[in-house]
Structure formats: C-alpha cells, structure tokens
Amino acid sequence: MKSKCLCGAVEIEVELSNTEVAACHCSMCRKWSGGPMLAIDSGELRSISNESLVTRYLSSEWAERGFCSKCGTHLFYFLKPANQYHFPIGLLDNGSKYKFSHQIFIDEKPEYYSFSNETQNMTGAEVFAHFESDG
C-alpha cells in the first residue's frame, strides 16, 4: 500500500501485518496529534521517497515519531523495542477494511470524549508490562 503526505512530497510504501486500528490516549500522542492517535497496530515500512524531508523525532527512550518536514503530516510512530511501525489510519487509503479493536493508555483518556465501539482497553501500566514480557 502506498500513501503520500498532505503536500505530496513524501510517499511511503507500507506492508500491514493486520487491519486492526488502535487508539492511543497517552499525553504524548494527544499532544502530537491534537487528540487520540488512531493507528494501524503494526506494519513494515517498505520504502520512503524523499527521505531527506522526513524528520524522525525521538519522543521517548522507546519511540520515534516520523513526519514530513515540509507539511507536517504524521507518517509513522516507530516502537524501538519491538522494531515495529504504527501508521496513522488517516494516512492510509481504503478505510472500510479496518476494525477499531483496542485502546491503550485508557487511564490517560480525558473525560471530554469517548468512543462507542466495544474494544479491548489497556492502561499505561498494562501496556508497559505487555512489552516487558515480550522483550
């Protein structure tokens, strides 16, 4: 699957390992995206055109966030310990095949919004425990 940033300067080609969409409610994702980050849970970044226009921001010890330095479009969240890319759902085409399946950092979700979908929910502590057990 190929997709472009808002200005079209950067094109990424991704291979998705599943079609599950997750919402992250952590304070960093909300600050970065202006709300919860809705992303495909994992995939492989196959190629990036104009990689010199992609800024990788080390947002924590465990993750990088990639965006187009020309228009600011969010391109990926890279989870370093799992060597795993997560792609914003709005960046990808063909939204009808995706399933909203889980929410993480549910304990940091503000009260002013909620989703009606039934999902698996994990607190921040549960997310960290999950990745520690995988490592």
Image (tube, rainbow, N blue to C red):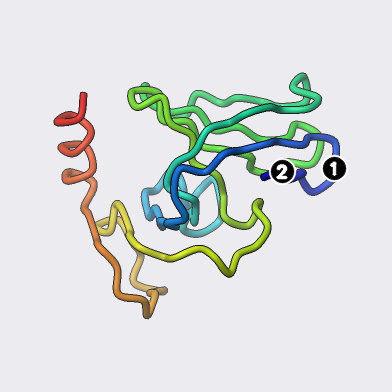
Relative to 88, is 117 above or below?
below
Horizontally, residue 91 falls left or right of residue 50, namely left
Amino acid residing under circle 1: Gly
Horizontally, residue 34 falls left or right of residue 109, namely right
Residue under label 1, please give it: 8
Q: Earlier in the sequence, mark 2 or mark 1?
A: 2
Amino acid residing under circle 2: Lys
Horizontally, residue 40 falls left or right of residue 91, namely left
Relative to 30, is 9 above or below?
above
- The alpha-carbon separation of the residues under discs 2 and 1 comes to 12 Å
- Horizontal and vertical percent for residue 54? 71, 27
Q: Residue at x 50, y 28 (%)?
A: 64
- For label 2, count other residues whose C-alpha is less than 10 Å away and answer few (under 14), some (14-19) or many (20+): some
Q: Nearer the viewer, residue 134 or 128?
A: 134
Quadrant housing residue 112: bottom left
Residue furthest to the bottom: 116
